[in-house]
Image (cartoon, grey):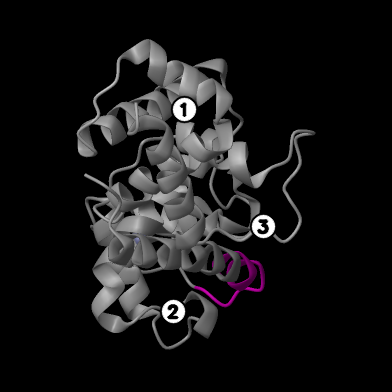
Amino acid sequence: MLLDQRKLDLAVEMQAKSYALLRWVGQAVASGLLSFRTAHTYSSLPLAAAEWIEKHFQNIPEAARVDQTDIPVFANFFSTYLENSFDLIENPGKIKFSPDTHCFCPMCSWMIDAPNLKTKSLSAGDKKRALKMQIHSVLQLGIDTSAPLDESLAQAIVSQNGEATALLAYGHDLIQRLDATANGPAVLALWRRFAWNASGSPKPKFRLSTKMILNAESELRALVAPR
Ligand SMILES: [Zn+2]
């Protein structure tokens, strides 16, 4: 399926707000504003996140707050953000919280560690998987535009259009994340392909937009379709 602009708009918003929420939680935990004494029995991270966000809704700053009706989808997205991008450090909260006084449900485990979550380091396997996602998205674009292509051509398109194909693959992944599908750190590798510069540092002031992703799709479409 070609990218759906409406879903993409929602996903791009959820991503920016997930980042803002995690930053806010980090500050709130560090300054002792959040308590983790209530024992929860949530079984999954998305479910735990939804109830957590609901409960703290009034305190969450504007930049990290979604419409109340979007909370379930935001919780889905937020959980993939944690899983794709961060490593949960051993001995969560050992400084501020003693283990017998806080909750170990999936959400609290993450939140307690929010001030010192570590960005995942990428393995060669993650990068290879990112490349596969790029190739797959080009093959899919061929199918969706009635111009199917073979894998070697898709590979060539990827190697000549690294940024655009990473954006396309990332766009498809963004939409899956609305359903809580986390494809893991390969997604972080895709992100760095377009949001970081060649020297390996984040592009200053980079801000992902729907337009950027849709432009990449139409650029690639012109390469795939008119043969
Ligand atoms: Zn909990």
Disc 2 element: loop
Label 3 close to label 2 by CB (< 8 Å): no
* SS for dot 1: helix
Q: Main secondary structure of the magenta part?
A: helix
**N-terminal-most mark, 1 or 2:** 2
Circle 1 Cα neighbour tier, 10 Å, few/some/many (<14 / 14–19 / ≥20): many
Image point (75%, 35%), residue name: 200
- The verdict on residue 200 being magenta is no
Which residue is outermost to the bottom? 58
Is 103 situated left or right of 26 in this image?
left
The stretch in magenta equals 25-34
| For residue 137, above or below residue 32 | above
Q: Alpha-carbon distance for marks 1 and 3? A: 20 Å
Question: On the rendered structure, is 129 left or right of 225?
Answer: right
**Residue at which label 3 appears:** 206
Tag 1 residue: 130
Is residue 29 in the magenta section?
Answer: yes
Q: Is residue 126 above or below residue 6?
A: above
* x 60%, y 65%: residue: 23
- Name the N-terminal-most of marks 1 and 3: 1
Q: Tag 3, which secondary structure?
A: loop
Q: Which mark is residue 65?
A: 2
Q: Nearer the viewer, residue 105 or 171?
A: 171
